[in-house]
Image (cartoon, rainbow, N blue to C red):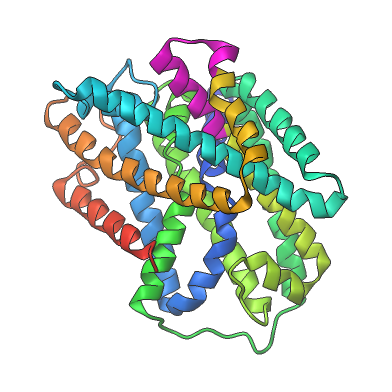
């Protein structure tokens, strides 16, 4: 029985880790190799390691906040508890709720449009049809709830890993003998790379889902965050290495130069990888958006889901790709703002709370908090380079 219980717990932890990985990994992974070249070998290694460490600390902070408040089920609930107080509290809650929903809708629209842009050339079907089909497939999983999302994330992350392993085999057979990198790049290159990796690792809306899925069990929640971000790290590094060792020129979108060097198979595999990444992100963000709408408005089930996701599909039919690109930037900025808001919430929470802790003494010390704050400011600066 003990062995069976351990296996069951490991499966649940892996599923929760896939929720984190699925929310974090996205099409942005294909932009990382271009920035790695600018940062150089030393800068690249340092950026990946620092981004993983800082991301783990930030996501553990969010989990800690969730675990300390039994009645809080989403990130907005945390801010309502610790930040949006006093006379202006009500107005701030409403304002941030509206901003958050708009940005989440925009993110969902970007996933729908992005998937259609990738799939359409592969199967010669109209983009409008692809957008509707992608939405329906993605929406059905979200409607089935957290367990279905966790199962879908688990299967899809495994498929993405299999795709990447296959791409590695093709890449190993097509190494560019002239491929090379500088040992050390510029500070701007390092900051830009660090910023891009941090955005790619961001899974702030998946943490509450992981906490709920694991029934607020401290150790499994901690392991799921560490493992989920580790999966993102491995996938991102693999894409970067394969692109750099094969491409004659590392392009801004890695799959372009990578496929030109290795062949059409990698283009197809890379396209499927990105589509799966968008699908997993849609599931996590769609579920988070539905939960936030439900909690803040009192609406339940399909009504909250429709309010949270249908406008995203409509948005893809009334806006251009340039608009979608702009919304992605806005979404990244809001993700940064939310992350920075987590820090004061965490500090307030830790002052007067004696509940069992997820983080160890050093991880929640003022030195670790200051380190995370500084590195998020570096991320903000790097995003403009």
Q: Is residue 296 magenta?
A: yes
Q: Examine the image and state in which quarter residue 180 appears.
A: bottom right
Q: Is residue 305 magenta?
A: no
Image coordinates of residue 244 in percent, x first then y, are 61, 75
Residue at left 66%, top 48%? 114
| Quarter occupied by the C terminus | bottom left
Image coordinates of residue 303 in percent, x first then y, are 57, 13
| Quarter occupied by the N terminus | top right
Q: Is residue 111 left or right of residue 207?
A: right
Residue at left 44%, top 84%? 183
Instruction: Report the predominant secondary structure element of the magenta stretch.
Output: helix
Residue at left 21%, top 30%? 83
Q: Is residue 13 left or right of residue 222?
A: right
**Count of marks placed on residues:** 0
Q: Is residue 4 left or right of residue 381?
A: right
Q: Examine the image and state in which quarter residue 184 appears.
A: bottom left
Q: Would you place residue 14 above or below residue 58 in this image?
A: above
Direction right: furthest residue: 124
Q: Examine the image and state in which quarter residue 340 appears.
A: top left
Highlighted magenta segment, given as a residue range: 284-304
Q: Is residue 88 left or right of residue 228?
A: left
Image coordinates of residue 154 in percent, x first then y, are 63, 36
Most foreground residue, 39 or 356: 39
Direction front: furthest residue: 318
Is residue 4 visible in this depiction of the protein?
Answer: yes
Most foreground residue, 5 or 110: 110
Image coordinates of residue 55 in percent, x first then y, are 38, 50
Q: Would you place residue 240 above or below residue 109 in this image?
A: below
Is residue 66 visible in this depiction of the protein?
Answer: no
């Amino acid at each position: 029985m003990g062995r069976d219980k351990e296996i069951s717990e490991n499966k649940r932890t892996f599923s929760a880790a896939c929720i984190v990985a699925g929310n974090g990994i996205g099409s942005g992974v294909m932009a990382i190799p271009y920035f790695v070249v600018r940062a150089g070998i030393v800068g690249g290694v340092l950026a990946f390691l620092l981004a993983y460490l800082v991301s783990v600390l930030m996501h553990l902070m969010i989990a800690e906040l969730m675990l300390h408040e039994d009645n809080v089920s989403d990130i907005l609930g945390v801010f309502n508890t610790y930040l949006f107080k006093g006379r202006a509290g009500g107005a701030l809650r409403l304002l941030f709720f509206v901003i958050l929903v708009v940005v989440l809708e925009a993110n969902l629209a970007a996933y729908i449009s992005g998937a259609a842009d990738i799939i359409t050339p592969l199967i010669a079907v109209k983009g409008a049809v692809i957008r509707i089909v992608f939405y329906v497939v993605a929406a059905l999983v979200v409607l089935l709830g957290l367990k279905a999302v966790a199962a879908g994330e688990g299967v899809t992350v495994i498929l993405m890993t299999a795709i990447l392993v296959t791409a590695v085999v093709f890449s190993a057979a097509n190494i560019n003998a002239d491929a090379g990198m500088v040992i050390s790049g510029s500070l701007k290159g390092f900051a830009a790379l660090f910023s891009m990796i941090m955005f790619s690792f961001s899974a702030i809306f998946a943490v509450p889902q992981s906490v709920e899925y694991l029934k607020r069990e401290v150790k499994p929640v901690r392991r799921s965050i560490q493992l989920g971000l580790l999966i993102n790290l491995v996938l991102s590094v693999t894409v970067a290495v394969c692109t750099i060792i094969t491409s004659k020129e590392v392009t801004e979108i890695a799959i372009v130069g990578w496929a030109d060097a290795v062949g059409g198979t990698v283009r197809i595999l890379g396209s499927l990888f990105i589509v799966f990444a968008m699908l997993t992100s849609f599931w996590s963000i769609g579920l988070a958006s539905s939960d936030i709408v439900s909690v803040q408005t009192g609406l339940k089930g399909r009504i909250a889901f429709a309010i949270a996701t249908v406008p995203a599909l409509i948005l893809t039919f009334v806006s251009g790709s340039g608009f979608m690109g702009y919304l992605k930037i806005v979404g990244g900025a809001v993700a940064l703002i939310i992350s920075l808001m987590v820090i004061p919430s965490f500090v307030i929470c830790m002052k007067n709370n004696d509940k069992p802790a997820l983080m160890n003494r050093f991880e929640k010390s003022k030195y670790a908090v200051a380190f995370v704050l500084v590195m998020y400011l570096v991320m903000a600066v790097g995003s403009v380079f």
